[in-house]
Every structure is written in structure tokens, then in C-alpha cells.
Amino acid sequence: MFGLFKKKTQKEKLQLKYEKLTKVAFELSHTNRKLGDEKLAEADAVMREIESLEKQ
């Protein structure tokens, strides 16, 4: 209840985006490998952003 209006940090937003992209990439890999690889590359870029935030 107390965290109801708490804003998410940039890292938390990026982690959610990473999880969504990896899930979509996994689902696409079964039907269209090229699109799945593209989504996985996007997820990798998001992970690099998360790592750069952790270094700061």
C-alpha cells in the first residue's frame, strides 16, 4: 500500500523492458528466427544500458 505511488527507477524500467524483449524474442524464435534475433539484439542493448547505470 505504501509503495503504491512510488515511481520506478530508470534501472527498474529498463529491467522490465529487457524481460519483455527476451520473452518476445523467445516466442518469435519459434516462428521467425530473424525477427527473434532482432529482438534479442534489442534486449542486449537494453542490458548494456542497465550495466552502464550500475557502473555509475
Image: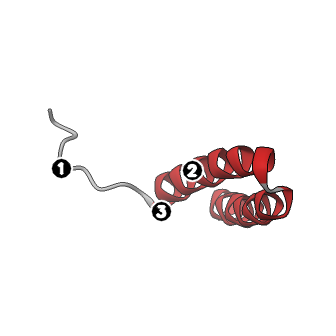
Residue in view at x 77 percent, y 63 percent: 35
Quadrant assignment for the N terminus = top left
Q: Quadrant of residue 47?
A: bottom right
Kind of residue at disc 3:
Gln
Q: Which mark is residue 10?
A: 3
Q: Which of the two labelled residues, at mark 2 and mark 3, occupies the earlier sequence position?
A: 3
| CA gap, disc 2 and disc 1 | 23 Å
Q: Which of the two labelled residues, at mark 1 and mark 3, occupies the earlier sequence position?
A: 1
Circle 1 residues within 10 Å: few <14, some 14–19, many ≥20 = few
Residue at the spot of label 2: 20
| CA gap, disc 1 and disc 3 | 16 Å
Q: Nearer the viewer, residue 25 or 49?
A: 25
Residue 51 place in picture, x, y as percent: 71, 58
Residue 15 place in picture, x, y as percent: 56, 51
Circle 2 residues within 10 Å: few <14, some 14–19, many ≥20 = some
Side of 54 relative to 4 (left or right)? right
Q: Are marks 1 and 3 in contact (CB under 8 Å)?
A: no
Q: Secondary structure at mark 3?
A: helix
Q: Quadrant of residue 32?
A: bottom right
Residue 34 place in picture, x, y as percent: 85, 63
Q: Nearer the viewer, residue 45 or 21?
A: 21
Circle 3 residues within 10 Å: few <14, some 14–19, many ≥20 = few
Residue 9 place in picture, x, y as percent: 42, 57
Q: Kindly report which numbered mark, 2 or 1, lies closer to the viewer in this rendering.
A: 2
Q: Quadrant of residue 3?
A: top left
Question: Which residue in the rendered view is the most extreme toward the left?
Answer: 1
Kind of residue at disc 2:
Lys
Residue at the spot of label 1: 5
